[in-house]
Amino acid sequence: MDAGQGLSTSEVQSIREALAAGRKPRVVFTASAGQIAGQVGQVVELTDPEVSDEFVVVRFGRDELPFSPADLAVAPKGAGRRVAEPKPEPEPEPPAAAAPEFVLDTPRVPAQRQEEPKVEQAEKPPARRAVKAAKPKSPAGLTVTLAYADGEWTVAAQQGSKALAKPYVVKPAEALKMVALVDVPGVQEAVEQILGTERAEAEQQAEKLRAELAEIEARLAELREAR
């Protein structure tokens, strides 16, 4: 029996389909499984391979332990069947005690020593293989985006494919503080240039509004004098 190769991806998929059909495929332990190499067990469950590399749960004796695909191989047909154990021969009955003889000058025959049956020490069951702790799954990456469009600064946050915060508007001063934390040449200059352009446009609009307000106040003054 070649127990050196582990389970391939297609073999794992076949085992998954067999479990879904209600069967429990037999597997043989490879050399990487330790002391139980060459023994045969039954796959009872497949857990999440992303949580732990040992996601193949195998029933061996009374235990159900997780193993990695490298520890297992598909068992050949006929493997794992029990061989009929020979029945122990009945122990011979001790001979009945003979009645005392009254014949003179009969030499005493020493009683034959009966050998005690040897009791073979039962083999110790294989040591239970220590189960490795499941490797913690690393969290998804976090992305925070500061963007400028149509005269507004927005901030958004996303972890993996999940949006933690939809883009929301922030003040230009807050955007400048965020950019100041990024020590990259050219980034802060670009932000200051955008803010300078917005500042100039705002000053022009304010000057225009002041002029319009002055005209309205002059007109109002004329209307008051006409009363």
Image: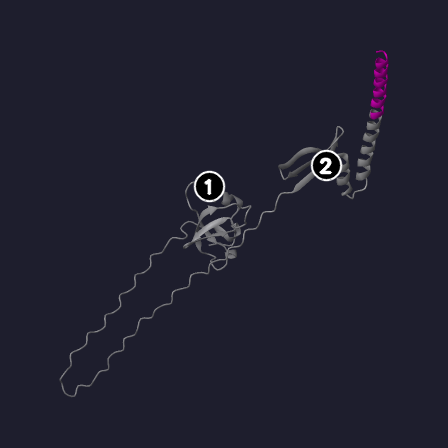
Identify whether 112 is placed above or below 201: below
Q: Quadrant of residue 125?
A: bottom left
Point out residue 161 in the picture as x, y percentages from the top left corner.
62, 37
Looking at the rendered structure, the kind of residue marked 1 is Glu
Answer whether residue 217 is magenta in the image.
yes
Sooner in the amino-acid sequence: mark 1 or mark 2: 1
Point out residue 220 in the picture as x, y percentages from the top left corner.
83, 16
| Lateral position of residue 196 relative to residue 128, left or right | right
Element type where label 1 sits in the image: helix
Residues at marks 1 and 2, CA–CA distance in whole angstroms: 48 Å
Report the residue marked by disc 1. Answer: 17
Point out residue 31 in the picture as x, y percentages from the top left corner.
51, 57
Say which of marks 1 and 2 sits in front.
Answer: 2
Q: Residues within 10 Å of mark 2 (few under 14, many from 20)?
A: some
Answer whether residue 49 is magenta in the image.
no
Q: Which dot marks residue 146? A: 2
**Residue at 81% in and 30% down:** 198
**Residue at 49% in and 49% down:** 56
Magenta-colored span: 206-227
Main SS category, magenta section = helix
| Lateral position of residue 116 relative to residue 179, left or right | left
Q: Residues within 10 Å of mark 1 (few under 14, many from 20)?
A: few
Point out residue 124 in the picture as x, y percentages from the top left corner.
42, 63
Q: Nearer the viewer, residue 49 or 1?
A: 49
Looking at the rendered structure, the kind of residue marked 2 is Leu
Q: Residue furthest bottom?
A: 105
Q: Quadrant of residue 97?
A: bottom left
| Lateral position of residue 97 relative to residue 117, left or right | left
